[in-house]
Image (cartoon, rainbow, N blue to C red):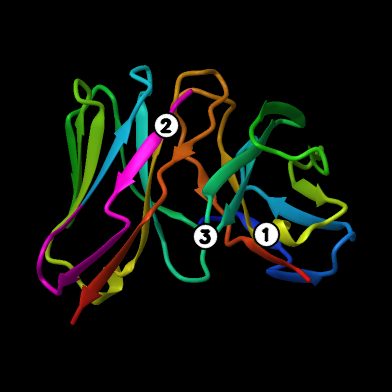
């Protein structure tokens, strides 16, 4: 079955710097890759997603890149702000017919003011 | 606000007890998913219902069960509770039953088993 690995587990950056979180997946048939942000005491919130027919997608300060050959995808946050501090999860949606997400283990991002 | 609601927000109970968690999906969504989030295991998929029927099963214990009602709200029943069941339980919803679909998560229910 699908397996998703996420790195790093924790990441500290200075305000204004960029942050990059990487995920690898095992099932080459996976075709949808969402990223979620989870703030303390709240549920995961979708921040960006990418489909397998696209290599990159941007939304203001957030971008996601996908390398299907290498089976990895990354989240890029530019000009980080303190409110970006949260736990970020990547996920993959395998085409196994069950439509469930396989989540990475999460990255705790701290933006230092 | 995702539009997915969950009650209760917090639940404290004792080992051996039974609890019911409730989820209302976003308006128009037919699928409900349940996830368990514990410190050492991340987000684990438990079960999916689509329009009242079980669609997919993940790592759900036999002591746990779920159902989706005609109004599309869902309940997750946890019985014979153990200390290790303490976790955050999230439900998510999506429009259809499959394909490439975004899942929207509720705020979660924090369960503490003493």
- Foreground label between 1 and 2: 2
Read off the chain for label 1: B
Within 10 Å of the Cα at label 2, are there few (<14), some (14-19), or many (20+) other Cα atoms? some
Q: Which residue is mark 2?
A: A3
Of residues A34 and B87, the one drawn nearer to the viewer in this rendering: B87
Q: Position of residue A46 (x, y in %)?
A: 40, 50
The residue stretch that appears in magenta: A1-20
Q: Residue at x 22, y 23 (%)?
A: A68
Query: Is residue A54 highlighted in magenta?
Result: no
Q: Quadrant of the C terminus of chain B?
A: bottom right
Q: Are marks 1 and 3 in contact (CB under 8 Å)?
A: yes
Q: Compared to B91, does A97 lie above or below?
A: above
Residue B32 in sight here? no
Read off the chain for label 3: A
Q: Which residue is mark 1?
A: B6
Within 10 Å of the Cα at label 3, are there few (<14), some (14-19), or many (20+) other Cα atoms? many
Within 10 Å of the Cα at label 1, are there few (<14), some (14-19), or many (20+) other Cα atoms? many
Q: Which residue is mark 3?
A: A43
Q: Residue at x 34, y 30 (%)?
A: A25
Q: Position of residue A49 (x, y in %)?
A: 32, 40
Residues at marks 1 and 3, CA–CA distance in whole angstroms: 10 Å
Is A48 placed left or right of B7 in the picture? left
Is B43 placed left or right of B12 in the picture? left
């Amino acid at each position: 079955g699908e397996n998703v690995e996420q790195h790093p587990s924790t990441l500290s950056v200075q305000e204004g710097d960029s942050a990059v979180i990487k995920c690898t997946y095992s099932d080459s048939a996976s075709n949808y890759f969402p990223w979620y942000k989870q703030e303390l005491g709240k549920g995961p919130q979708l921040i960006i997603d990418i489909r397998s027919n696209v290599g990159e997608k941007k939304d203001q300060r957030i971008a996601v890149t996908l390398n299907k050959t290498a089976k990895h995808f990354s989240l890029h946050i530019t000009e980080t702000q303190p409110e970006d501090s949260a736990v970020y999860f990547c996920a993959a949606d395998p085409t196994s017919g069950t439509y469930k997400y396989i989540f990475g283990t999460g990255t705790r991002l701290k933006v230092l003011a | 606000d995702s539009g997915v609601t969950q009650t209760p927000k917090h639940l404290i109970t004792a080992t051996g007890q039974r609890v019911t968690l409730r989820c209302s999906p976003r308006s128009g969504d037919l699928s409900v998913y349940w996830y368990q989030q514990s410190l050492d295991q991340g987000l684990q998929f438990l079960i999916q219902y689509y329009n009242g029927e079980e669609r997919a099963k993940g790592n759900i214990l036999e002591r746990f069960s779920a159902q989706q009602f005609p109004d599309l709200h869902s309940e997750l029943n946890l019985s014979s509770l153990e200390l290790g069941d303490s976790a955050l339980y999230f439900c998510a919803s999506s429009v259809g039953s499959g394909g490439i679909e975004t899942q929207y998560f509720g705020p979660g229910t924090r369960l503490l088993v003493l």
